[in-house]
Image (cartoon, rainbow, N blue to C red):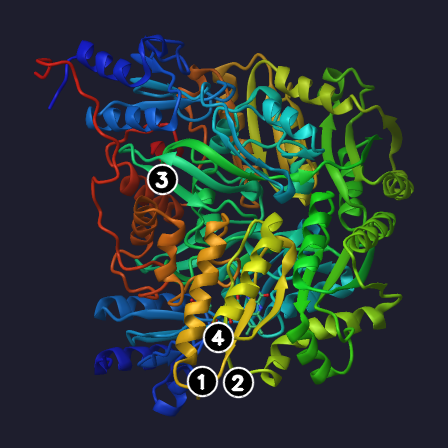
Amino acid sequence: MVVTTPALGGALRAIVGTEHLHEGGAPVDGAAPRWTAAPATIEQAAALVALAHDERLAVVPRGSGAALELGHPPTRVDLVLDTRRLDAVLEYNPDDLTVSVQAGCTAGALAARLAGRRQILPLDPPGWAARSLGGIAATQASGPLRQRYGTMRDLLLGVRFAQADGVLTWGGAKVVKSVSGYDVPKLMVGALGTLGVLLELTLRLHPAPDHEATWLASFRTPAHAQDCVAALLDSTVQTNRLEVLDGRVLAACSLPVSAAALAISIATVEPAVRAQEGLVKAIVQRAPGAVQTMGASFWKTYDRALAGFDGVTLRIGTVPARLVETLGAVQAVLPGAAVAGAAGLGALRALVTHADVSVLLPPLERLRATVGEVGGGVTVERAPRALRERLDPWGPVPAAALAVMRAIKTEFDPRGVLNPGRFVGRL
Amino acid sequence: MALSASVVAGLQHLLGPAGVVLTREGRLTYESDMLTLYKGMPDAVVLPTSTEEVQAVVRICREARVPVVPRGSGTGLIGGATAPQGGVMVSMTRMTRILELDLANRCATVQPGLINLWLTNAVRDRGWFFAPDPSSQMVSSIGGNVATNAGGPHCLKYGITTNHVLGLEMVIGTGEVVSVGGKAADRPGYDLTGTMVGNEGTFGLVTAITVRLLHLPEAVKTALASFASLVEASEAVSAIIAAGIIPAALEMLDDAMIGAVNAAVGKVYPDGAGAVLLIELDGPRAEVEAQAERVAAICRERQALMVTVARDETERALLWKGRKEAAGAVGRITAAYLLQDAVVPRSKLPQIMREMVAISKRHRLLFANVFHAGDGNLHPLICYDDRKPGELERAQQANEELLHACIALGGSVSGEHGIGMDKAKNLPLQYAEADLNFMFRLRRVFDPDGLMNPAKLLPSHPACGEGFRPARPTLPAGTWV
Ligand SMILES: Cc1cc2nc3c(=O)[nH]c(=O)nc-3n(C[C@H](O)[C@H](O)[C@H](O)COP(=O)(O)OP(=O)(O)OC[C@H]3O[C@@H](n4cnc5c(N)ncnc54)[C@H](O)[C@@H]3O)c2cc1C
């Protein structure tokens, strides 16, 4: 059965109430939605998805809107499902180090709540404080703390979501250790909402370290920086964050410019921070590099610098032993780019300002070829729509794996209700 | 169900006579895993040596619609590597190579049959280790660990198997070889690696695994604290976690286990204690020192009878010896037992321990405990005498009651052993029908014919229906066109 547009609007309004259903609404990645709905409960969210499913509407979930440019540009945006009213902390169990939140809750709001018990959710992608936790989960966004704590995939214990037909579904558990049934939370992390609209998350927390100290190590060449990373990884130093910064990122942080620098932090009880300081400095000097102690505000400055970059952002996945090649490859093909990221894991970001579509295409292909030698890839995390229309923002996925991904999407969203066409392989 | 002659011939042609076990005596060892309540003899056992051979086996079986059951070392505790519907069991014991060690990138790629501890043994002298350490690590395979998403004592700090798996190669139920993930960070697409870990062979067979290796810590300190009862020891566990300290391991043994261990390996734990906590801290030396003091203070505040810290490697090994020999020592207290693996939120440990004591009294059964207390993962051995009529049933009843109590406290039906045949029926306690339905459909994507380790992990298929959908909102009258 087909329903007229005004009637559909009425039905959507009936679910969320007049104030929370708008005709149109803010464009998503350049595409104007027909409606924007902001549910107050997960049941309302599920009812919206169920209606969209029956009426074959394309649903685009949104949280804070920080990462709406990830993926292929949307071809259809009928209903934007805005999760920002779903911002409650549902259940905080400090003695278990777990918390359950609604997906629209921001990382900053949760951090404020946890601070009273000296606990943290160690997820810090650029601009993290304003970002919704559902969005961080859907985009598998990460920041410097992944060096020690891993990413959302390591912290998400349980998840409630609305399937494409509106069925509310739960996967995982509310305890820190569970192997009962398939690991559905892992499937949902980084899936860009294409298998379900994430509505509630149960997360593992960590105790906040007593004390953190940060040093900036500057090197004359990227090779020295890489030697230093290798030596740190092959030592008993327990780094908390280990970021590489190239000259342009250093400049953006108003720091003295060098060919490459490492921001190294140690976080634990104070005597242990002091005890490791000597080791860190010795390793840096041996590389050889120069060490400078940074104030506590460094990581805020760094976060602001990365979040504030205006232009194209590329996520580069490589391995730690290929730092030099990767930095070199970026400089060779994109001479204006700034590069920073988790040096110990090979998870980097390249920031390209004033990108011109015609100029960017061939370099991206060449960069993908270089990183691809170790099985890595380059994802366009943010770029003008015009650019993403001309290239695959995700890059190649091996055929057999893509076939499985396609089969999963077809099983759970055969009608293409959830973020259609935006994920890898235009799923 | 006997195999057809053409299937047998196909397997023999592929693997040679030495690669196919057909005799009854030969197959008998494969009829169960370590949970011998569930028995099912495969019609044939095959021993492939490569991914290509595994794929060819799956293709032969698919064509003939014969079930395929993967098997690592058979140390599972869930009725997993057993063939209740017959078919072909694929043993990974000839696929034990380390394919690549890449210490510069902190990882290794191995074949699934490699024994867990062998990997650490191969890299330890260079300062590295593979973190997942199930107590069975001397015998269980990494493929089995991946398939069950195994945990272990040190998973409290380091995370379980899935947190250390970077990539997998799998022959899935469609007969395709799929490689997912890998050394490099941040692959685009669904996290198939994470989705496949813990599938218990129901998606197919893992044929290669890339794992993360970690650097050995600078210092390790092991302490033993004894308490009057399980409840007090549990309160100490909760207090340590609540104080923001995550030890590397936090293991508990109760008086029944202490007695058994002391009888088996000599007096390693104090007699007369109701429970002991084995606490291990590792990391930078100064951190370990500071945390050890805090932990000892917390134990004393919680009425510890005694707190001792191992002064050297010999003393440390002795403290662990009891824990490591516990499984073997059980034979001294009972001929048969059921092992429960449920989880409670860790702050609920004292409460579940009280409940456990009550259940044990109610059913007049001995419960012996040795478990990963730090994550709230219980492992009571519910002891029974299989020669006494009705005792097994009583033990099963007590087991179910305990499981229900754990779920009522917000827990999970399994912390690390998995589901297999044993707990499939319990999943509905933790999941609604819609949730199970989602998992059933996920399985079907990987194994459309239902031939991969059938009858495991999920209860029989819940109805695929509209029943779970929210009610359709009423549209204004007359607006249908
Ligand atoms: C004394 C003792 C202590 C134990 N301690 C722990 C512990 O601390 N933590 C813990 O988690 N477990 C523990 N276990 C349980 C068991 O050792 C683990 O589940 C282990 O991971 C099983 O490995 P395995 O090689 O023996 O697998 P198996 O028992 O052979 O198989 C287990 C399951 O995985 C499947 N499987 C095996 N290999 C593959 C493959 N290559 N591809 C696909 N599927 C496969 C099988 O079909 C089966 O369903 C213990 C067991 C014993 C006997």
Query: Mark 4 against mark 3, which lies toward the viewer?
Result: 3
Name the residue beneath numbered marker 2: B335
Name the residue beneath numbered marker 1: B386
The secondary structure type at the circle numbered 1 is loop
Q: For the residue carrying disc 3, how many other residues have a C-alpha within 10 Å: few (<14), some (14-19), or many (20+)?
A: many
Q: Amino acid at mark 2?
A: Ala
Q: Amino acid at mark 3?
A: Thr
Name the residue beneath numbered marker 4: B74
User: Do callouts 1 and 2 mark residues in contact (Cβ within 8 Å)?
Assistant: yes
Name the residue beneath numbered marker 3: A169
Q: What is the CA distance from the residue labelled 1 to the residue labelled 2?
A: 8 Å
Is B366 situated above or below B428? Answer: below
User: Do callouts 1 and 3 mark residues in contact (Cβ within 8 Å)?
Assistant: no
Ligand 1 contact, mark 4 (Cβ < 8 Å):
yes
The secondary structure type at the circle numbered 4 is loop
Do tags 1 and 4 sit on the same chain? yes
Instruction: For mark 3, name the chain.
Output: A
